[in-house]
Image (cartoon, rainbow, N blue to C red):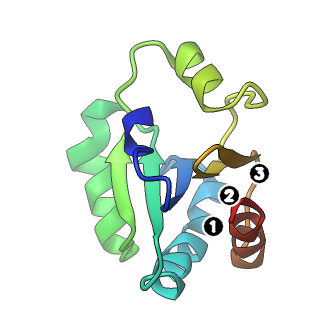
Amino acid sequence: MLKLFGNNDTTYVINFWATWCKPCVEELPAFDSLSVLKSNSPVKVILVSIDFKEELGKKVMPFLAKHSVKSTCVLLDEVNGNDFIDRISPLWSGAIPATLIKKGNKKVFIEKKIKLTELLSAIESVQ
């Protein structure tokens, strides 16, 4: 996961979510809107589902299709969740939704439901 951060010119917006998390589902359109707004700039939106691996085909993929989610989505397949959480941010309790915005050595971590205006402000803060 952390290997994604190879390009210092790119701002990475990584959102941790699950299909069963109502606030997560409610904020997904903001990430798709962000992808469209920033399509001509070096901003990469990645949605990281923490649903169980076994649910990928029967739950996650149908959910993404039903809701027309266009952002890149990956499934977290981490053996040790606590180690992973600490690597993302020492501030993260593990609750979702959670969003990491990173550019180079600058990063912002937000552990709550987020709106598009907040996403845009957070991106500005790491530019």
Identify the disc placed on residue 27: 1
| Callout 3–callout 2 Cβ contact below 8 Å | yes
Seen in the image, is 35 located left or right of residue 100? Answer: left
- Residue 89, position in %: x, y? 68, 31
Vertical placement of 105 versus 24: above or below? above
Q: Check disc 1: other Cα within 10 Å, few if <14, some if 14-19, many if 20+.
A: some
Q: Amino acid at mark 3?
A: Lys
Label 3 residue SS: loop
The structure residue drawn at horizontal position 30% and vertical position 39%, both measured from the top left corner, is: 55
Q: Which residue is mark 3?
A: 112
Label 2 residue SS: helix
Q: Check disc 2: other Cα within 10 Å, few if <14, some if 14-19, many if 20+.
A: some
- Residue 107, position in %: x, y? 69, 47
Q: Quadrant of the N terminus?
A: top left
Label 1 residue SS: helix
Vertical placement of 83 versus 12: above or below? above
Q: Which residue is mark 2?
A: 23
